[in-house]
Amino acid sequence: MIEAPPSPKPSTKTNLVPANSSPMIAVRSLVKRIGQQEILCGVDLEIASGETLAIIGRSGGGKSVLLKHLVGLMAPDAGEIWIDGQNIIGMNERQLGAIRKKVGILFQSGALFDSMTVEENIAFPLREAGERDPKVLHAKVEEMLEVIEMEGQKDKMPESLSGGMKKRVGLARSIIRRPSCVLYDEPTSGLDPVVADSINRLIHRLQQRFGMTSVVVTHDMKSAFDVANHIAYLHEGRIYFYGTPIQLQQARDPILQDFLLGRSEQGVAATS
């Protein structure tokens, strides 16, 4: 893995993580094979409590596979995953259920229930956890609608929502139980630049308001640079680079340069 050099100047971000923060997530030598293909080839990664990490890399490079491992949706062939001090490898579904209370996940599509209103979708995790008091449910949903800037939209059905609104509602559902960490799988995928920017600002605001740890898998480099304290580049199944956005922008490594510039190997050969 490339060790990024010290940044020549302090970042202008206001959401920097203290150097002594203990990791919320630690991944150790993680290996995953699917068929004959080794997708993850010994991933090592630490994510500090309260920080936002962006994971970038080429399509099909294992980013979403890594994300699914962090909540036990996939099991590795080797390695360890520590969430808030607990190794989740080998846990049964009941044990994983307790871990998933700490870690919310926003899927690409938002994954809303088509037959439920916005309010019912957002309240669903609370009902599943046994909350039945209508006043409590209503108050918590109203708080989440304020957080995602969708006040007055609680009675709408998913079919009447735009792509950006669906992702906001999906995010509200993910955080209504106040997890310590939120995982985002391509949160700006399929959105126009203005809506994508609003999602980026929402991710940043959640970190500031609730102190949530965020892991953002993305192809959108603007999103990565806008929201992340650190960026990890997953390449050929390993973390090839880890550093701050400034360090990545200043990197002269040709593999990183090709990715940042959207330059294929064939394109490099043709111009060399």
Image (cartoon, grey):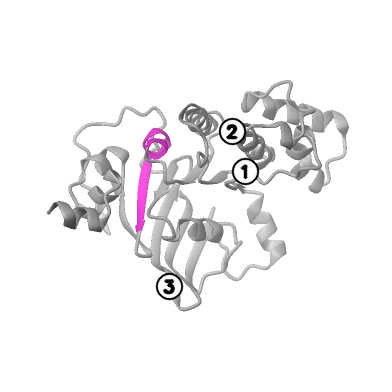
Q: Which of pointers 2 and 1 indicates the residue nearer the eye? A: 2
* Left or right of 190, for residue 56: left
User: Where does the image place residue 32, in percent across and percent down from the top left?
Assistant: 48, 70
- Is residue 197 highlighted in magenta? no
> Could you tell me if the residues under marks 3 and 1 are in contact, i.e. CB atoms within 8 Å?
no
Identified by mark 2, the residue type is Gly
* Left or right of 22, for residue 135: right
Would you name the residue on which mark 2 appears?
164
Q: Quadrant of residue 97?
A: bottom right
Would you name the residue on which mark 1 appears?
179
Magenta-highlighted residues: 222-234
Q: Work out whether 212 lies above or below 105.
A: above
Quarter of the figure with the N terminus: bottom left
Query: Callout 1 environment at 10 Å: few (<14), some (14 to 19), or many (20+)?
Result: some
Q: How many marks?
A: 3
Mark 3 or mark 2: whose residue is earlier in sequence: 3
- Residue occupying the point 42% across, 31% down: 15
Q: Work out whether 228 lies above or below 194.
A: below
